[in-house]
Image (cartoon, helix red, strand yellow):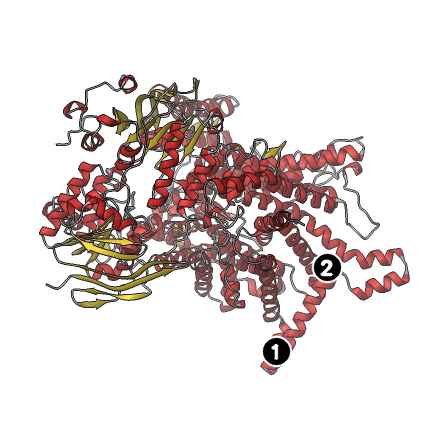
Amino acid sequence: MSEKENNEKQDAGKVFLDELTAEPSGETFWARAWHSISIPLLAIISGLVLGGFLIAVTSDAVWAAWAQSPWEAVKTAVVEVRIAYTALFSGSLGSPSAIVSALRGGDALEIRRAFNPILESLTASTPFIFASLAVALGFRSGLFNIGAEGQIFVGAIFSVFVGYSLTGLPAIIHIPLALLAGALGGAIWGFIPGWLKAKTGGHEVINTIMMNYIAFRLSDWLLNGPMQRPDSFNPVSPTIMDSAKLPKLFGPPIRFHIGFFIALGVAWLVWWLLFRTRWGFDLRSVGSNPHAARYAGMSIVGTTVAAMSLSGALAGLAGANEVLGLNHFLAMAFSSGYGFDSIALALLGKSHPVGVVLASLLFGTLRTGALRMQVVAQIPIDIITVIQAFILVFIAAPAIIRTIFRIRGAAGPEEAITIRGWGGG
Amino acid sequence: MATTIIERREVEIKSPTRQRVMGVLFLLLGASIWLFFGRGIEAGVETTFKLVPGGFESSLADWTLPALATLNILAFASAFLGGVQLVRGFGKRTNMILGIVASFFIFGFLVWAAAGKSMNLAGLLNTTLSKAVPLTLGALSGVLCERAGVVNIAIEGMMLAAAMVGALVGSVSGSLWVGLLAAVLVGTLLGLVHAVLSIKYKTDQIISGTVINIFAVGITSFLSAKFMQPNQALNDPGVFRPIVIPLLSKIPILGPILFNNNMFVYSMFFFLILIHVGLFYTRWGLRLRSVGEHPKAADTLGINVFNTRYMAVLLGGAMAGFAGGYFTLGSVGRFDEIMTAGRGFIALAAMIFGNWTPFGSFGAGLLFGFADSLAGKLAILGVQIPSEFLLMAPYVATMIVLAGVVGRGQMPAADGQPYEKE
Amino acid sequence: MEPVLELRGVTKRFPGVLANDQIDLDLYEGEIHALLGENGAGKTTLMNILYGLYDPDEGEIIVRGERVDIQDPGDAINVGIGMVHQHFMLIPVFTVTENVMLGEESLKFGDFLDRESAAKRIREISEQYHLEVEPDVKVEDIPVGVQQRVEIIKLLYRDADILILDEPTAVLTPQEADELFKIMHSLTEQGKSIIFITHKLREVLDVADRITVLRGGKIVGTTTPKEADKNKLAEMMVGRAVQLGVDKGPASPEEVVLEVRDLVVANDRNQVAVDEISFELQAGEILGVAGVQGNGQTELVEAVTGLKDVVDGTIQLLGENIANADPRAITEIGAAHVPEDRQRDGLILAFPVADNLVLNTYYQEPYTKGVVLQQAAIMDSARTRIAEYDIRTPSALTPTSSLSGGNQQKVIVAREFSRPIKLLVASQPTRGLDVGSIEYIHKRIIEKRDEGTAVLLVSPELDEIMELSDRIAVMYRGKIVAILPREKATKEQIGLLMAGVSPDEIEGVSSRKNKDSAQEGLTS
C-alpha cells in the first residue's frame, strides 16, 4: 500500500470520528475512539448506580433491615437492587437458560417465548430510533426540536387516518402510503416552527412546545369527534385495515415487526444525507454557523425549514410506526413521552445516527425490562425516567463524570450544543 | 471646527405592511363579530350577565343587554378602528388599539354565547383569576431567572416536584404551612441544580431545564406510585381556605372577585409588586438586570456575575416551588401524576407574552386563564365550538407574539448565554 | 518621585503561549505612558492582569509603594485603577446614569436607587473634565464618541486615578481622536495617570510622555517621542526593519466591473445606513472606502455581496443588476468577498480546513456529483491550496478553529482568490493580524489588481487605505462625501472628510454633488 493510500485510509477513519466527536487532537485512533465513547458509557453506568440507590432507599425491606443494623440494611439493599436489575435484564434480554432449554426442547412456541424479551426490546427501541434521529438531525442543523412529541402525535393521526379510511388497497401500496402520511403529518408539524424560526426568528424551542400542546388538543378533539370509532364511547380511533399493518415476522407472542428494519434503513439514510451529500453539508453548515452559511450562499430560510420539516417527518414516522406496527388504532396519550426521551437519546448518541441507534437500543431494552421489574420487584416503571434524567445530566455536564472518574479532559473545546437566545438571531 | 454638513437620515423605514395587516385584522374582527355572532341572533333577544359570583349574596342587579344591538355596536366600532388604522395608522398606539379590538371581539363572543341565557360574568372572572395564579407565579419565576440571563424552561418540572412534595409533607405533618415550606424548598433545590448545571458547568440551559423536567416527571410518578397511591393518607394535605377581607370584599363587582380568595392569590399580588419594585428601583434589581444584559460589563464593575445569577435562579426556583404548592395546597388538595399538565410551559409563554416584566406576565396570565375558564363554560352554555380550540388559543397567541406580529419584545440581551470568565 | 504604579516581573502563560514574559513597567503621576505593540504582542493580556480579569502566573503589582493583590475588577477599582475597554462595557438599554452608577450605586431608603444624586455627580464630573454627556438618556441612543466619554466618566465616578485606555481611537475619526487626546491631557493636568494602549505610531508620537514597546510578550524597550521616530518604533514593534508602505505599480484601469447607482440600504434597526450613493469601479483598480466604522461601510459591502436587501437603487456587476440578488448568484457571476468578521462570516470554525476551502463551491463539480459530495476531490484541492497559500495547518482535516488568526485569514484568501474572479470585495482584510500576515495579504490583493480584478477595499485604517488604493472614497453618515484619486489625496484631507467637514471647506478638494462624484472619479 502506498503511503498516500495509507493516509487516505486513516483519513477516512478520522473523518468518521470527526463526525462523532468534532474534537481535534493529535491522539491515536483508538485513544480518540475511547474518548468519544467513555463519557456516554460512564454516564450510563453512573445513571444505573444512582437508580439502584433510589431503589434501595425507597424499599420497605431495606428500612425494615435498617431497624436491625446498618449492615443488614446494606446487605438487604444489595439483594433488592440485584433482584430489580436481574428482572430488568432478564425481562429485556431473556434468560440464557430459558433460551438453551427451549432450543433443546424444540417446541416452536417455547422458542418464541424464550426469544420474545430481546425481540420485544428491539420493538420498543424502534420508535426511539425514529424520534431521536429527528432530534439529532435538528441538533446537527442548529435547531432544538423539543416538539418531537407533538410531531409523533400528528404523524400517528395522519397515518391512522390513511390506515382505516382507505380500503381495498394491497399491503404493498397501503403500508408505504400510511408511513408516508405519518411522515407528512410530522413534517407539517415541524414545518410551522421551522418557517417561523426562519422568517420571524421566533425561537423553535418555545414554538415546538406550543405545537406539542396544540397537537394534544387537536387529537383530543379528533378522537372525541370526527375520528372517533363509531361504536365506541371512548376517545379512540377505528382500527386500521389489515393491509396497513406492518407485517409481524414471527408468530405470537412475538410482536416484532418490520418497523425495526425500516428504522435502521432510515438511520442509514439520515447518515448518508448528513455526511455524504451537499444537502447535508448545507444542514451542518447552517447548524454550525448560520452567518458563514449565508455568506457562502446557502439559503438559511430554506435549510432551516427543510431541517425542521425533515426532523418532523422522522418523528412522524415514530408515530406511524407505533400505530401501524403495534396499536393499530390511535388513543389518547399513546406516545408516553418518546418525544422528550428522544432529546436524551440524541445527546447520548452525540447526534450521530450510529450513536443514536445504539442509545435507542439501550433505552428500548431498559423500558422493556422495566415492565418486568415492575411485576417482579414492584418498582414503578417511572424509575426508568429517573435513570434517564441522571444519564442526561452526566452527558450534558461531562465535567461531572470527569471529576468522578478522574478522566483527563479532552484537549480541544468540547462539542457543545448551544442554543442561541430566545428571540432568534 | 468640524462642521457637520450632512445629517444622517435617521428616519425609520416604516413597514407599511404592518399597518395594513393590522388594519385588515381589525376589519376582519369587526366583520366576524357581525357575521358569526350578530347574524344568528334575532332582534329582541337579551343577554344577561350576573355580576356576583355564586355563593355570594346578590347585592347587584344583573346586567342585561340587547344582544343584537350590542353586537352591532361592537362590530361597527372595530370596523371603524380598522378603517382609521388603514387610512391613518395609529403608530405607536397600534398595540393598544389591538388590545381594545381584541377585547371587543371577546366581549362580542360572550354576548353571543350567552344570548337568550344568562352567564355569570363575575364567576368567570373569578375562575380566570384563580387559573391565572399558577401561571403568573410561574412566569415570575421565569422573570427572575431570565432577567439575570438564565433561561428557565424547567418551571414545569419545578412546579410538579413542588406540588408533590407539598402534598406529601403537608399530609405527613398535618400542616399546610409546613407543606408549603417544603414545596418552596424543593423548588429552590431544583433551582440550585439548574444553577449548578448551567452556571458552573455551563451546560446548555435548555438542556439543563429539560433534564429537570424529565427528572421531575420520573421522580414524582415513581414516588406517587410507590407511596401515595397505595396509602391515601399520604396524599391528603387539605387546602388553604379563602380569606374574606372585610370591607374590601364589599366593593361592588370587584370586591367578591378580588378579595374573597385564598392566600395564594394575595401572595401573587404581593410578589408582583415586590418583584416589580425590586427589579426596577433597587440596587439588587439593577445588578441582576445588568448581569442578564451584559455580564462582562457587570464583571468589570466588580459585580460578581456568578453569585448574582445563582441568587436569581435560586429565587426563581423558590417562586416556581411556591407556584407548585398552589396545585396541591391551594387548589385540588391532592397530588395526581403529571398534574401540572404543561402549565409551566404556559407560564413561560406568559412571561414572553408579558415582555419579561412582572405585570406583563400577570396580564398574559389573566388572558390565558380567561381562555381556560371560558373553555369550561362553553359546554354548559351549549355553544357549538369545541372547547379544545379555545384551549389552543394561548399556544397560538404565544406563537404569534413570538413571531413579532405585535412588535418585538425586549428580551434580556444575554439571556441563555453562559458567562465565561476569561 | 515614586511611581504610582509599578509592575515587576509579571508573567502569564496560556496553553502553548507565553503571553507576558517578565514584564516590568512603571507609571508616574500625571503621565501618559503609551504601551505600543502589534496585535498579539500581549498588551491587552497585561492590562487584563492589571485589572484583575486574568491571574498572573508570576510577578507583582505595586500601587503607590504598596504591593497589591488584584483578584478581580473590584480590587482594581479599590486601589484606584480603572479601564476603558476596547469594546465598550456599556449596557445599551440602561441610561447613562445607570451605567455609570452600576456597582457603586447611590442609594436612598436602604436599597433603593437614588438616580438624582448620581446624575448630579455625573454632571459635576462632566463639567470638571469637559466630558459632555446627558445622564438621563439610554446608552443605545447616543453616538459612539459620547459612549466613550461615558466609559471615562465611569472611571472618574469611582475616583480612579490610574486610567487604562485600550485602543481608544479605533472607533474615532482622526479629529475625534484629537479631541480625546485633549481630554487625556486635561485629565493628567488634574493629577490622573494614563496608560494608553495602541498599535498606531502616529498617536503615540502625538500624545505620549513615554513609550514602552512590547513584542511577543516581552518588553523591547522604553523611549520618548523626542528620541524616537516612526521608523524606529516600527522596527522595535516588529523586530526587523519594516518597509512602511507596499511596492505597487500604477493601476491600469479597464472596463467598468461594478456600477452602483443611488443605492439606499437600511441597517438592522431599519434606519437608512447607506444613503443614495453612486460610484463605479473598473477592472484593474483598487477603490478604497475610508470612513469611521459605522458610517455605512458594512451595509454597503453587504448590499454588494447580496447579504443585505437593497431599499432602492441599482448595483450592476458586469452588466447584470445584482441588487437583492442571492449571494450565491453574485458569487457565480465572479465576485469574491473577504468578510469583515472572518470568524463569524467567513469560516465555519468547527469544520475542517478542507471543507472551509470549498465553502462556497462545494456544490459544484468536481466537489459534488449529483448530490453526493466527492471527498477525494475536496481533499485534493485542499492540499493544493494549502501548499500554494502557505497555510500552516497539521492537516487538511484539522478543524479550522485550531489555526492562528493569520492562517484562518489565509484560508479565506485561498478560497476566494483561487477562483477566477472579476470583483473582489475586501472588508478590513487585515484586522487583528500581525505584520507578516498583513504584508502577505496586501501583496496578494495587489497581485489580484494587476491580474485585472476590480477591488473594493473597505477599511477604517487610514494607513491601509492610503497604501493600497488607487482611488479613495470617503463615507460619512451613509454618503460618499468625496472620491479622490490617490495621488491628490492627503491624510489630513481624508481625515477631515471622515469627520464630516464639507468638501467645499477643504483645500484641494473640489466641491461636488454626490451624484456626479462617480464620473469625476472616473475621469481623474
Report in which chain the residue with disc 1 lies: A
Q: Which mark is residue A92?
A: 2
Q: Residues within 10 Å of mark 1 (few under 14, many from 20)?
A: many
Q: Residues within 10 Å of mark 2 (few under 14, many from 20)?
A: many
Residue C483: quadrant of the picture: top left
Q: Which mark is residue A362?
A: none
Q: Quadrant of the C terminus of chain C?
A: top left
Report the number of numbered marks. Answer: 2
- The picture places residue C222, in percent across and down from the top left corner, at 20, 55
Residue occupied by mark 1: A73
- The picture places residue C355, in percent across and down from the top left corner, at 53, 41
- The picture places residue C234, in percent across and down from the top left corner, at 25, 46
Q: Is residue C216 left or right of residue C396?
A: left
Q: Is C17 in front, or is C251?
A: C251
Give the mark nearer the N terminus: 2 vs 1: 1
What amino acid does circle 1 point to? Ala
Mark 1 falls on what kind of element?
Answer: helix
Q: Is residue C116 left or right of residue B38?
A: left
What amino acid does circle 2 point to? Ser
- The picture places residue B164, in percent across and down from the top left corner, at 52, 60
Using the image, determine if residue C239 lies above or below residue B187.
above
Mark 2 falls on what kind of element?
Answer: helix
Q: Is residue C334 left or right of residue B275?
A: right
